[in-house]
Amino acid sequence: MLFIFHPIKLLLGVVITETVNGAEGRERLKQRNVDLILMDMNMPEMDGIGPIKSVRTDLNRETSIIIITRRERGDRKSGMEAGANACITKPLD
């Protein structure tokens, strides 16, 4: 779930879509299919676990999901158990 309010073209043929939180991201994914989801685990309204489970269970999609979290939090384990494919730790350089 990339979180963007409007389409932005960074690379030819690549469109990034962003939402402000996990709940909005989950609803947006019901309307469109994406190739990759980058998801911060610490979001307002709904943390990253809910949208990951929704993608895997409710939408039954195998879209690659990369979670972004802080090193000291237990989000990596819970995100991977929920169905994420990989994890990136903050801060990002």
Image (cartoon, helix red, strand yellow):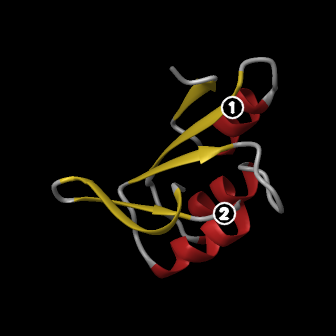
Residue 56 x/y as whole percent? 58, 58
User: Which three-letter amino acid code belongs to the residue tagged 1?
Assistant: Thr
The secondary element bearing badge 1 is classed as: strand
Q: Gap in Å between the C-alphas at discs 2 and 1?
A: 16 Å
Q: Are marks 2 and 1 in contact (CB under 8 Å)?
A: no
Vertical side of 60 occupied by 88: above or below: above
> Which residue: 62% across, 76% down?
27
> Which residue: 54% across, 56% down?
1
On the image, which quarter does residue 23 sit in?
bottom right
> Which residue: 43% across, 76% down?
32
Q: Between 15 and 52, which is closer to the camera in this rendering?
A: 15
Q: Is residue 64 left or right of residue 82?
A: left
Residue 28 x/y as whole percent? 55, 75
The secondary element bearing badge 2 is classed as: loop
Nearer-N-terminus badge (2/1)? 2
Residue that badge 1 annotates: 69
Residue that badge 2 annotates: 20
Label 2: few (<14), some (14–19) or many (≥20) C-alpha neighbours in 10 Å: some
Q: Is residue 73 left or right of residue 54?
A: right
On the image, which quarter does residue 15 sit in?
bottom left
> Which residue: 78% across, 51% down?
47
Residue 71 x/y as whole percent? 72, 18
Label 1: few (<14), some (14–19) or many (≥20) C-alpha neighbours in 10 Å: many
Q: Farthest residue in the left direction?
A: 12
The tag on residue 54 is: none
On the image, which quarter does residue 45 sit in?
bottom right
Vertical side of 23 occupied by 13: above or below: above
Q: Farthest residue in the bottom direction?
A: 31
Tally of marks: 2
User: Which three-letter amino acid code belongs to the residue tagged 2?
Assistant: Val
